[in-house]
Image: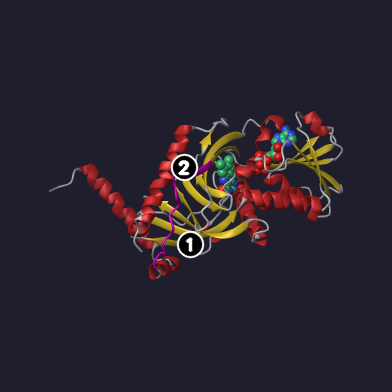
Amino acid sequence: MDRPTTDRRSFLASALAAGAYAALAKSPAARAAQEEPPRRLPPAKVSRDRVIRTVVGLRPYRPEGFVLTNERLGEKVVVHNYGHGGGGVSLSWGVAQMAAEQARNLEDKSLAVLGCGVIGLSTARVLQRRGKAVTVYTRELPPETTSNVAGALWYPTHVYEQGKVNATFMERYGLACRLAHREFQSYVGPEYGVRWMETYTFGSGPLGRELAGGPELYPETRFYSDAQRSFGFPFVRQFTSLMIEPQTYLRALLRDFYAAGGRVVVKELKTREEVAGLPERVVFNCTGLGARALFGDQGMASMRGQIEVLLPQPELDYGYLANSLYMFPRADGVILGGTFEAGNWSMDADEATTKRIIEGNAQIAKGLKNSRQ
Ligand SMILES: Cc1cc2nc3c(=O)[nH]c(=O)nc-3n(C[C@H](O)[C@H](O)[C@H](O)COP(=O)(O)OP(=O)(O)OC[C@H]3O[C@@H](n4cnc5c(N)ncnc54)[C@H](O)[C@@H]3O)c2cc1C
């Protein structure tokens, strides 16, 4: 019997997709994956009664990408370093080094950093390593910052909107990714809560080599065809990235900052005039979402994220991404995501979102439990 046209189209589309996938599957890494069967992944125990907290955070998102520029403010120079969206933890060391480079010709020994999230702390540490005396001015300290809410997988995603950034931005983004990825490797170990982690992308359609920041930053990338049987999803990509435990990591960075002679002043700066009144002549603005009000950046939006945290499950040694859902195992709980809501400024937990996150991740866990390797 002849198929209706629409069926033929979707048949053709999936045949083409399968062809593209087959081509990809001929890469050396994919061949290695075919030789080596996937291991059995222990499923997360996902249920409402294992939820220990629901957390909401507002990502400092700029569709036009993060800001790394110098601005004159009377006698002062302000080096802006904010607006890193859903990838601020990942990019932190890279943009910190780039911000410090922007100020390399300034002779001042004492510098100010505004903000004590991951961007402010990394920037402060890079400046200290260059022999500067740094004072951090901040409204909140860890664990009260947005940086503490992050997942945090090294995966610099949701950092800009396609079509709103130019080639120069993409070059800087690429450089920030490479610098940060290299620097984070010096922090691997329990002291900083950083480790390498096997990560999977589960897809209902074919998955390409594109990974946030560039495929070369993800060793051991593999593709599994015939994946339904093993993972409960038809298309699966495996890669290795760094997992950062924000509570441990930020605490350790703050300790390093103090140990190197850093000073913290807990203070909210409300206007440019207040910034202009600080004793330091060079000021690094790392206020994240706070830059919108403080420096009048209307291009800065919020991208709301809600996560559900389950009781820790030490046997989970991998993480996954599946569209907007994700799972990252941490010492302080199993992180289930998530939401990426641009323009939503609500800090209230949303019950419908909780339900979607729990049910969606429970479905994935069920697929893994029923899988056969
Ligand atoms: C749910 C969720 C999951 C995420 N997951 C990941 C992930 O897996 N990987 C990843 O790389 N990133 C992730 N992110 C993104 C990441 O958390 C942010 O990009 C990053 O934390 C931004 O860091 P920041 O230092 O700029 O901002 P913040 O952490 O918000 O720090 C800003 C600092 O500035 C201070 N401040 C603000 N305004 C003023 C003012 N007027 N005066 C004085 N001080 C001020 C604040 O008190 C704070 O100390 C996630 C975010 C969320 C919400």
Q: Is residue 252 left or right of residue 259?
A: left
Quarter of the image with the C terminus is bottom left
Q: Is residue 86 left or right of residue 263?
A: left
Q: How far separated are the C-alphas under marks 1 and 2?
A: 35 Å
Of residues 211 and 235, the one nearer the viewer is 235
Q: Is residue 132 above or below residue 305?
A: below
Under mark 2, the amino acid is Asp
Residue at disc 2, secondary structure: helix
**Residue 198 image position (x, y, % from top left):** 51, 60
Crowding at label 2, few (<14), some or many (≥20) Cα neighbours within 10 Å? few
Specify which label sits upstream in the sequence, 1 or 2: 2
Instruction: Report the predominant secondary structure element of the magenta stretch.
Output: loop
Residue at disc 1, secondary structure: loop
Say which residue label 2 marks. 49
Under mark 1, the amino acid is Thr
Crowding at label 1, few (<14), some or many (≥20) Cα neighbours within 10 Å? many
The residue sitting at 64% across, 44% down in the picture is 147
Which is more foreground, mark 1 or mark 2? 2
Magenta stretch: includes residue 268: no
What is the magenta range? 37-52
Badge count: 2
Q: Which label sits on residue 46? A: none
Residue 138 found in image quarter: top right
For the residues bearing labels 1 and 2, Cβ distance under 8 angstroms = no
The residue sitting at 68% across, 58% down in the picture is 191
Can the viewer see residue 96 in this picture?
A: no
Q: Which label sits on residue 221? A: 1
**Residue 185 image position (x, y, % from top left):** 64, 61
**Residue 165 image position (x, y, % from top left):** 57, 42
